[in-house]
Amino acid sequence: MTASLSTAATEKGRYFGTAVRIDQIEASPRLRQAVLNDCGFLTPEIHMKWNALQPARDHWTPGPADGLVRFAQANELRVRGHALLWHNSTPHWAEDEIVRERNWNTVGRYIEAVAGRYRDHVEEWDVVNEPIDADGSTDGLRDNVFMRSYGSSYIARALEAAHAAAPKARLAINDYSFEYDNSTEQVRRTAFLKLLERLKTAGTPLDAVGLQAHLDLSKGPLKPEILKPFLAEIAGMGLDIAITELDVNEHDRRLSLRERDARVADEVRRYLDIVLDEPKVKGVTTWGLSDEHSWLQPTGAKGAALNRGLPYDAVLEPKPMHRAIHASLLA
Ligand code: G3I
């Protein structure tokens, strides 16, 4: 029996979870078993995105999201909702309507409906996903349909709307590329901290931040002197921190499987040892459990061509990354 990551996390007052799709759980008994063995929290990988829930204005498709929530309830697992607003999952009909009408109705109605529907089931929501863009846009905020129609206030308005619809849910902003020592990620860290500061100063209902943590072996060493002060600044604002989408992009797949798995595990161990030193980091979620389902797979890849950046390989055998997470959670 593989050691349980959830049990290890719980022992230290944290949680461990993963992103999943209900159709994948139903299709694979081994994935189901791994989810139940390792997880205390689930994030729907796609089912709670706007284009998945409401592909057309008068057509709602909550079946998969409801199915995942039922699976979680039946197995006493908690749910992180992902994500109310994300530029990449806003359906075209909604973008058109937002641009055409320029009032808050489209977004307001959507948040009320979805945060309201899952108010008793989703414990923490990624309310705004990926609002930061380092490419010289206003205040480091991404130039998306929400910015263009409402200005930067869309973030606070979304948080207020989510809070009104689901007053008990914890509300988060989730974003990526804060881990490494390069100028792009430095600009992103600074922009993110400024955004959080503005929201907290204004008294916006924001409880937590999600750090995606898509690690990348081509980006150089992870440095405690970069990451720790960043986490400390977030913690200093009274915000909790969730590691929300942990995985590793290998890039170079020429070494032996053994060496590759060791490099992935070392990167994860190094990252988690740094971030779990911060008490405000409340939990860790990987973006999938098995390499078979990873978004990082090159199209059509099989065998050794698969990226090996998740805790289990494509046939659900645990890899050194699993042992690394377990050890870091207990350290
Ligand atoms: O289900 C359809 C299928 O019917 C169709 O044949 C196929 C053709 O492309 O598409 C399938 O839908 C895809 C879906 O994943 C399920 O596989 C979508 O095109 C594809 O866009 C979608 O990708 C997801 C992506 O977010 C966009 O929603 C990835 O699985 C998911 O891992 C990824 O997750 C994001 C986080 O939400 C935010 N952070 C980055 C992370 C990785 O991109």
Image: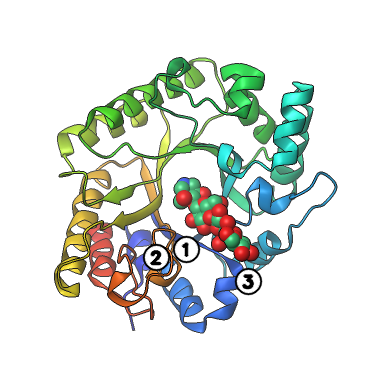
Badge 3 or badge 2: first in the primary sequence? 2
Where is 318 relative to 127, above or below? below
Residue 243, given in percent of the width and then of the height, sits at: 38, 47
> Observer-nearest residue: 73 or 69?
69
Badge 3 or badge 1: first in the primary sequence? 1
Disc 1 target residue: 40
The type of residue carrying mark 2 is Ser
Q: Quadrant of residue 136?
A: top left
Query: Where's the C terminus, which quadrant?
Result: bottom left
The image's mark for residue 74 is 3
- Asked whether disc 3 touches disc 2, contact meaning CB atoms under 8 Å apart, the reply is no
How packed mark 1 is, by other alpha carbons closer than 10 Å (few <14, some 14-19, many 20 or more), is many
- Asked whether disc 2 touches disc 1, contact meaning CB atoms under 8 Å apart, the reply is yes
Left or right, residue 189 beside residue 261: right
Left or right, residue 199 beside residue 149: left
Residue 46, given in percent of the width and then of the height, sits at: 58, 56
> Observer-nearest residue: 113 or 208?
113
Look at the numbered disc 3 and give the secondary structure of its residue: helix
Residue 309, given in percent of the width and then of the height, sits at: 31, 62
Q: Residue at x 71, y 52 (%)?
A: 53
How packed mark 2 is, by other alpha carbons closer than 10 Å (few <14, some 14-19, many 20 or more), is many
Look at the numbered disc 2 and give the secondary structure of its residue: helix
Q: Residue at x 72, y 25 (%)?
A: 99
Q: What is the CA distance from the residue labelled 3 to the residue labelled 1?
A: 12 Å
Disc 2 target residue: 6
How packed mark 3 is, by other alpha carbons closer than 10 Å (few <14, some 14-19, many 20 or more), is few
The type of residue carrying mark 1 is Gly
